[in-house]
Amino acid sequence: MATLQVQTRARPKGRSLAQNEERLGWLLITPVILALLLMGVYPALSTIWFSLQKGGSFGLNTTWAGLSNYIKLFHDPQFWGAFKFSMLYSFITVIGQMILGTALALLANRKFVGRWLLRAAILFPWAIPTATNSVMWAYMFNDQYGLINSLLEHLGLMNPNHATVWLGSAQSATILIYILAIWKANSLVALLVLAGLQTIPEEIYEAARMDGASAWQTLWRVTLPLLRSTLVITLILRTIESLQAFDLISAFTNGGPGNATQNLGLYIYVQIQQFGDFGYGSTIAMVLMVVTLLFVIVYLRTLHRPALG
Amino acid sequence: MATMDTSSQQELLALPRTGTRSLRSRLRNLSGRGGMYILLLLILLIQFFPMLWALLTSFMTPAQTTSIPATLFPTTPTLSSYITALQGDIGRYYVNSIIASLSATIITMILGTLAAYAFARLRFRFKTPLLIFVLSLSLFPPLAQVIPLYQILQMLHLVGTLGALILPYSVLGLPLAILIMIGFFQDVPIEFEEAAVVDGMSRLGALLRIIVPITIPGLFATAIIVFVGNWNEYLFALNYTTTNTYTLPVGIVTISQTEFTTNFGVLSAATVMSVVPLVILILLLERRIVSGLMAGGLKG
């Protein structure tokens, strides 16, 4: 992305030294390239191949299927349910994370007493394992011995005899997943934006102040435009991760109630782990991969202006 | 909180007193500040609450953790949950997590440092396409990697051992680590290195004895970021481990989802234990992590 320009310094040196450099360079990167070929390129090819296979169990004794998996996918309501959930989840949570995360970062970038506390609070959710955190939230929202219902009863907002079964209805479970996802990844957005904010020189703000710009104008005309690259990269990272979300939902609702909160990630997992159907699982993974790639390309095409870099 | 309030008051008192107009602006300033600290308090509460609740629950007796209605504070604080957690399987998951995350971080850092140095400083053919290749692999969905990686791990007879986690973690952490470290290495003035080479040191020697020592804070921040990623990883751990090699996240979730009567005290104690070391590390290194990310991929 913006960082791909690599420093190349023209240094007048002898030919043998240049050859040395060439050899050393290759020597140093070869282990990494080999490892990534094995762990990255092979899986990509293998996923394509499996998506054209059917039958068998856990990848053994599969037979050629042509495009039949893709046709099956097209007529599979559970796939479309998961697809729709993934899209909505990604759309809503990424917008929420971007807005709240940026706001947190702007706040944490101001100078005030106790700022370190805010920065600590920003980093905190990032440090908690997503899966573990989801378990804690599920406990908090448990309808019987959960803290949330207990608090609501104490405040007189809920009748104890008709306790809300938060994770029992598709609607409230979905909304809670959105809230949890925004809460969890706020942090990462704030962290990246905060890092981006450090690169804006103080003089630019001073110049804006001299010109009589209000805080609001400075934000929209100076700060955010200068943060453009950071924001685009953050948006791309968040979109990729939210499309491929797995542990957050898996440990919170495990796709339930029914399949109401099942996203593509969980559906792949169900196909592979429960049914041992590598062919169909890989087909869904292919769709997920293509969708992710489409998002990245569209974002880079429409939003990224490398001129700043 | 108390210390924060007094120090902010001191700051207010320290403002120059010049007439009534400034009094008004000082009042406005005061209310603005008050509003800001209320907002801050709210943010802190929201950010810290789930873990605070885990902390409180971890000191409750098993009976209290499932009392109806739920209570906020432990009535008879006890360490029994921690003892149960450490004596039971959680202790083993803890050790597994440490071994897997730490080994993978070390391997990633060694391979990543060498490659990042080459990308940042050396001239060789196909450098830019190779760098694009390395970075583009971070776009590949982990979910699509689960099956093919499983086959590789099976071929290497690693399934059921911690190697099944160390190998993928080491490799998959590379793109991000390289991206961040290239930034650090480029920031070191090239003259340092040239002087060393003129003095007869090899390029590799200059890397180890000049560049690494200068950039060590940044490398440390990178290592923390990589380590946190490994420590919290769930998908591969879920697929490639057996009960003997469960890591903390998988172990904790498994306990909470499979047992009929979940012991939330033990669960909370395990959660707290899995989070606390990391949090302390991160709080100590907050500034470095932020500047680490800044030096890395987010410059442009």
Image: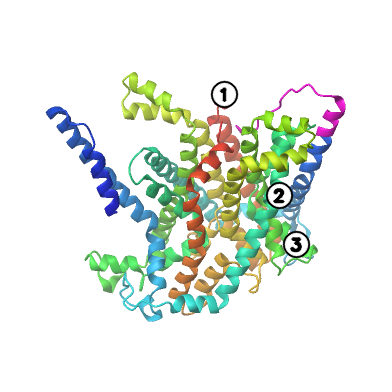
Please report the bounds of the magenta region as a residue range. A1-21
* Closer to viewer: mark 3 or mark 2: 2
Q: CA distance from mark 3 to mark 1?
A: 44 Å
Q: Position of residue A32 (x, y in %)?
A: 75, 46
Going 55% across and 36% down the picture, which residue do you hit? B298
Q: Amino acid at mark 3?
A: Leu
Residue lying at the far left in this picture: please name it.
B20
> Label 3: chain?
B
The residue under label 2 is B110
Q: Nearer the viewer, residue A154 or B8?
A: B8
- Disc 3 target residue: B153
Q: Position of residue B46 (x, y in %)?
A: 36, 55
Determine the image quadrant of residue A273: bottom right
Q: Secondary structure at mark 3?
A: helix
Task: State whether residue B91 appears in this view.
Answer: yes
Does A24 sit left or right of B42 as displayed?
right
Three-letter code, disc 2:
Ile
Alpha carbons under labels 2 and 1: distance apart? 34 Å
In x, y percent, where is residue A304?
55, 30
